[in-house]
Amino acid sequence: MKKNMCANKHGFTLIELLIVIAIIGILAGVILVSTSGARQKAAITSIKQSMRSISPAGLVCRGATPAPGDVQGAAAGDLLCSVDAASGGTDAVLPVISQCGTAVYTVTDGNTEEWSIALTDCPSVAACAGLTVDATGLSIIPAACN
């Protein structure tokens, strides 16, 4: 008696395996493309939140006792205030924004009530370069950084 060859067939053919691998590859590509936009939005949100944190510290600098302090600094980690905490000021520093790499700030009118701090350089998320904060919060938000 001859055995039926088809009855003993086990496993998948090479073509079937290649088709499944191709489908998985296409789905993985679609998912990676759709999540890259979410990563960019998360980085922008984090940068905006870091910049928002400057405003209250700047207000403490300006109203510090015994003498009002200047809002100052130009690079991440620079002191934000010329009056230290022991004298009633703040020891806050300009935030290091990890998404930007080396963040560089520009302080305008730091010795007046009209002070503002702009994020002038953010190489990794260039859309947020120019983001500016003052006593009211975020005062300038570049369109691409929304």
Image: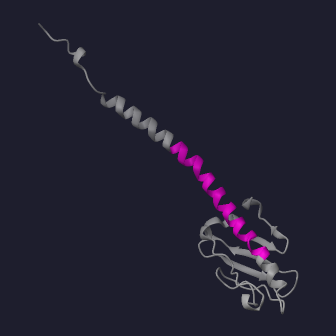
Task: Say whether residue 109 is visible.
Answer: no
Task: Say whether residue 27 is visible.
Answer: yes
- Measured as percent of width and height from the top left, residue 97 is found at 63, 71
40 drawn magenta? yes
- Measured as percent of width and height from the top left, residue 59 is found at 82, 79
Residue at the image position 66 percent from the left and 82 percent from the top: 75
Position above or below: 44 against 21 = below
As drawn, is 140 to the left or to the right of 100? right
In which quadrant of the rendered image does the C terminus lie? Answer: bottom right
Residue furthest right in the image: 113
Residue at the image position 87 percent from the left and 86 percent from the top: 112
As drawn, is 70 to the left or to the right of 18? right
Residue at the image position 59 percent from the left and 72 percent from the top: 101
**For residue 127, which quarter of the picture?**
bottom right
Residue furthest top in the image: 1
Residue at the image position 61 percent from the left and 67 percent from the top: 99
| Picture mark count | 0
Position above or below: 90 against 135 = below
**For residue 122, which quarter of the picture?**
bottom right
As drawn, is 23 to the left or to the right of 33? left
As drawn, is 145 to the left or to the right of 125? right
Residue interval drawn in magenta: 29-56
In which quadrant of the rendered image does the N terminus lie? Answer: top left
**For residue 136, which quarter of the picture?**
bottom right
Q: Main secondary structure of the magenta part?
A: helix
Position above or below: 55 against 85 = above
